[in-house]
Image (tube, grey):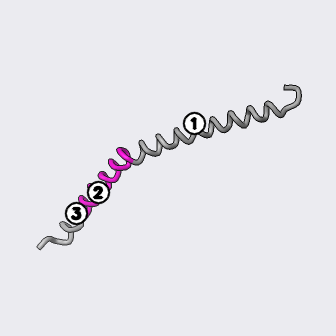
Amino acid sequence: MASFDENVRRWQLQAEAEVQRLIRQMNDEVVPTIRREGAQALHQLAQELRKLAEKIDRSTPGQ
Protein backbone atom coordinates (compact mmCIF):
# COMPACT_ATOMS: atom_id res chain seq x y z
CA MET A 1 0.00 0.00 0.00
CA ALA A 2 1.32 3.41 -0.99
CA SER A 3 2.24 5.83 1.75
CA PHE A 4 0.56 9.19 2.15
CA ASP A 5 3.65 10.96 0.77
CA GLU A 6 3.67 8.73 -2.30
CA ASN A 7 -0.01 9.42 -2.90
CA VAL A 8 0.55 13.17 -2.58
CA ARG A 9 3.52 13.01 -4.97
CA ARG A 10 1.49 11.01 -7.50
CA TRP A 11 -1.37 13.49 -7.25
CA GLN A 12 1.10 16.37 -7.69
CA LEU A 13 2.57 14.79 -10.84
CA GLN A 14 -0.90 14.15 -12.26
CA ALA A 15 -1.96 17.73 -11.49
CA GLU A 16 1.17 19.13 -13.13
CA ALA A 17 0.61 17.00 -16.23
CA GLU A 18 -3.01 18.18 -16.44
CA VAL A 19 -1.98 21.82 -16.10
CA GLN A 20 0.57 21.36 -18.90
CA ARG A 21 -2.10 19.73 -21.08
CA LEU A 22 -4.48 22.63 -20.46
CA ILE A 23 -1.76 25.16 -21.28
CA ARG A 24 -1.02 23.37 -24.56
CA GLN A 25 -4.71 23.27 -25.42
CA MET A 26 -5.08 26.99 -24.68
CA ASN A 27 -2.04 27.86 -26.80
CA ASP A 28 -3.01 25.54 -29.67
CA GLU A 29 -6.75 26.13 -29.85
CA VAL A 30 -8.06 29.00 -27.77
CA VAL A 31 -5.43 31.71 -28.30
CA PRO A 32 -5.41 31.48 -32.12
CA THR A 33 -9.21 31.64 -32.21
CA ILE A 34 -9.28 34.68 -29.94
CA ARG A 35 -6.64 36.43 -32.03
CA ARG A 36 -8.43 35.67 -35.29
CA GLU A 37 -11.85 36.73 -34.03
CA GLY A 38 -10.36 39.78 -32.31
CA ALA A 39 -8.69 40.88 -35.52
CA GLN A 40 -11.96 40.45 -37.44
CA ALA A 41 -13.80 42.52 -34.85
CA LEU A 42 -11.19 45.28 -35.06
CA HIS A 43 -11.47 45.34 -38.87
CA GLN A 44 -15.25 45.67 -38.61
CA LEU A 45 -14.91 48.40 -36.00
CA ALA A 46 -12.43 50.29 -38.19
CA GLN A 47 -14.86 50.09 -41.11
CA GLU A 48 -17.70 51.44 -38.99
CA LEU A 49 -15.50 54.24 -37.66
CA ARG A 50 -14.57 55.22 -41.24
CA LYS A 51 -18.27 55.37 -42.12
CA LEU A 52 -18.95 57.52 -39.07
CA ALA A 53 -16.07 59.86 -39.91
CA GLU A 54 -17.37 60.23 -43.48
CA LYS A 55 -20.87 60.98 -42.19
CA ILE A 56 -19.48 63.63 -39.83
CA ASP A 57 -17.44 65.13 -42.69
CA ARG A 58 -20.53 65.35 -44.90
CA SER A 59 -22.61 67.00 -42.19
CA THR A 60 -19.97 69.54 -41.14
CA PRO A 61 -20.58 72.97 -42.70
CA GLY A 62 -17.70 74.36 -44.77
CA GLN A 63 -16.28 70.93 -45.62
Q: Is residue 28 left or right of residue 6?
A: right
In magenta stretch: residue 40: no
- Residue 58, above or below 7: above
Please identify the quarter of the rendering in which residue 46 is found: top right
Name the residue that disc number 3 marks: 9
Q: Position of residue 21 (x, y in %)?
A: 30, 52
Task: Compare marks 2 and 1 and give the one earlier in the sequence.
Answer: 2
Residue under pointer 1? 43
Give the secondary structure at mark 3.
helix
Marks 2/1: CA distance?
Answer: 36 Å
- Front residue of 52/27: it is 52
Q: Amino acid at mark 2?
A: Glu
Chain-order first, disc 3 or disc 1: 3
Is the N terminus in the top left, top right, bottom left or bottom right quadrant?
Answer: bottom left
Q: Position of residue 52 (x, y in %)?
A: 72, 37
- Distance from label 2 to label 3 (Cα)? 14 Å
Q: Nearer the viewer, mark 2 or mark 1?
A: 1
- Residue 36: x percent and y percent? 47, 40
Mark 2: give few (<14), some (14-19) or many (20+) Cα within 10 Å.
few
